[in-house]
Amino acid sequence: MKTAIITITDGANYGNRLQNFAMQTTLEQLGCEAETFQRRTSRDKSAPQKAVYEAKQLVKKLIGRPTDDVIRRRRKRFQAYNQNYIQFSDVILQQNQAPAGLDAQYAYFICGSDQIWNTRFTVIREDVKNYLAAFAPGSKRIAYAASFGTVSVDEEFKADFSAELQKFKAIGVREAEGETLVRELSGRDAQVVLDPTMLLGADTWREKARKPEYISSGESILVTYFMTGRSPAIEQYIESVKDAFHCKRVINLEMEFLSPKEIRDPDVFCTAPDEFLWLISHAECVLTDSFHATVFSLLFHKPFVVFQRQAAEKGNQMQSRIETLLGYFDLGDRMDDISNATKLPASYDCDKVDAVIAREKQRSLQFLRSALEIG
């Protein structure tokens, strides 16, 4: 049975690439042939635009100004990961347009995972209908761990969501807030399911991990991953945690959207997704505001503290997915206030975590099997 995955494929985000691999692998384990549709976005440059861009980079290099070389190096490392781990289809989606005849080629279209329904993201806003698989009959549309990422949908897109969600065969969302939104927008019920990264075991992820060349043998590390940056107060907090855990080195992972001037450590900035796995699995502890860094901390049984991600707009808060995740394990006390960080990473009942994951994995896989009509 041939299935297509519809998710965010541009950019260089760790959680996004790892969830794509996990979704693909899970479908394959269920006996499906899985491909991911490629996407083109407003970020993609035309040939003339590329020529102008390269010329500007050359001029910057000649006059000694920072270039995008490090940013391009990171992108190339993510592209290499995609080539090694993701089975892409030749199908390209862009600007609410899709090739004709897809219905005849695929048995099902899987929308998810990740924030594919977050209308605050430009790449979503410009292609909402494709992220809802509007080109496909409703009987072939399945959402798995699809996330709105926020507490609301922008007004201009509510009609699209209302019309298209009603057509889905089955809707699985990643957080409780998403379940509420689906009901408000379409009157449909949705099921909260595990993020696909949690459908694969820790041993599977360890097998896919690769040690970064910039890490010395036996080096004890504290890993941080703040998508919204690190304030001076957080920097001091990080140092206090480093001392408390007797770590030799802090590895500050970065989000992709930094300017060349903002990149502190080019080698760390260019960490690939499989190296991200190694870092989390070998860290003494993890400090983060990232959903997926929290997921992998749990999978690898690492002490962690997770912070609410800051947002300029109240409606753009991304808290529900973290609250839903920690709620599975009664670990709400692992959350701290990023403006006044005081908690130290602490141990927790790892056996309970594993038992809950096993239970929720069974429930989530049953949702997928039922939607795919697999016995």
Image: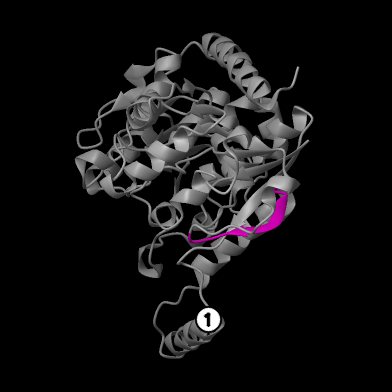
Q: Name the main secondary structure of what is drawn in magenta.
A: strand
Query: Is residue 91 on the magenta stretch?
Result: yes
Query: What span is colored magenta in the figure?
Result: 86-95
- Residue at 48% across, 82% down: 53
Q: In this view, does 186 lie to the left or right of 54?
A: left
Q: Residue at x 44, y 21 (%)?
A: 189
- Where is residue 285 shown, x and y percent of the image? 46, 30
- Describe the element under mark 1 as helix, strand or loop: helix
Is residue 118 visible in this depiction of the protein? no
Nearer-the-camera pick, 330 or 1: 1
Q: In this view, does 161 lie to the left or right of 30?
A: left
The residue under label 1 is 50
Which of 43/102 is in front?
102
Q: In the rendering, at what x and y percent does residue 105 appear? A: 75, 47
**Percent coordinates x, y for residue 339 in the rendering:** 20, 37
Quarter-of-image position of residue 357: top right
Rendering coords of residue 160 (x, y %): 39, 44
Quarter of the image where the C terminus is located: top right
Does 266 lie within the magenta span?
no
Answer with left or right where residue 53 lies relative to residue 309: right
Amino acid carrying mark 1 in the image: Lys
| Image quarter (top left, top right, bottom left or bottom right) of the N terminus | top right
Q: Give 316 or 263, whichever is nearer the viewer.
A: 316
